[in-house]
Amino acid sequence: MYKRIGIVGLGVMGGSLAARIAQYYPDTERYGVDPDRTTQARACDNGWVMAAVSSISALPTALDLVIVCTPIAQVRVALIEASEHIQSPVTFSDIASVKTPFMSVPLKANQHYIGGHPMMGSEKMGIEHAGLQILDSGQYVVVPQVPECPAVPLFIQWIAGMAMNPVVLDAHAHDQGVALTSHIPYLMACLTVGATQGHAVDPVVGPGLRDTTRVAAHDPVWGVAVCRENTAAIAAGLQNIRDELDHILGMLKTDPNQLFSWLVSAKNRRDTLFPN
């Protein structure tokens, strides 16, 4: 397994990944990068990293694995900077929720990029919300830059060793899929919240609204980034939803009883996606 790992970005996701590595691979040397000194101190005090620095240039130059956990807009720059800094053979990864933009990242000889995306997480921000439970027992999508790369099996084994389920996809399939399962649901949650503006709904707000709009609390910077980097897939999905909304409006205006079969179909699909 990897003996020396760098984690760039120690927010809720980077911190949670560091916590998981510390739990399952305690003998691994773990180095964190974050510009915030309070975050650095918390990561060290928790035992999630052995040392934390403010920049990639302060990392050791010999690492086996570097995972970039920064906001999406910073991932490419961080990968390039890390590639220039690390002198040993190394695997680079990230946890961004889009993958196509990073498939063309230039690397030096003996360096590999294997994209990653844990399909678990939190809408909250900051290391104070990080922890082992954030990444509990979920799917971890693995997106190799070069599918036949010899570094891929080791990376998959490493992910599985932390009680997560690695699933290999190509970048296009990943980005098309998360448009439907993550990016568009975020926008729909924001639309639902926005629909309450200007209405006296406070007395009738309950868990239904809270649960269906939870992801609207996500950082808007993330929302803009995924819309910018995954525009085509998101736009296509939204167009399909617009067409479906027109269909629903038509049923409401003509015969609301027609909605029953549509609602049954939606319920059955959800039960299939989330059987428990």
Image (cartoon, rainbow, N blue to C red):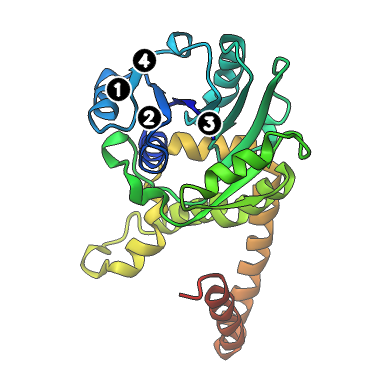
Q: Which quadrant of the figure contains the C terminus? A: bottom left
Identify the secondary structure beneath mark 4. strand
- Residue position marked by numbered label 4 in the rendering: 53
Instruction: Compute the Cα span from label 2 to label 1.
Output: 8 Å
Circles 3 and 4, Cβ within 8 Å, touching? The answer is: no
Q: Position of residue 93 (x, y in %)?
A: 58, 31
Identify the secondary structure beneath mark 1. helix
- Residue position marked by numbered label 3 in the rendering: 2
Classify 125 as above or below 34: below
Where residue 26 sits, quadrant-wise, is top left
Circles 1 and 4, Cβ within 8 Å, touching? The answer is: yes
Q: Mark 1 or mark 4: which comes first in sequence?
A: 1
- Residue position marked by numbered label 2 in the rendering: 10
Which mark is in front, 2 or 3?
Answer: 3
Q: Residue at 51% of width from left, 28% of height from top?
A: 68
- Residue position marked by numbered label 1 in the rendering: 40
Identify the secondary structure beneath mark 3. loop
Q: Amino acid at mark 3?
A: Tyr
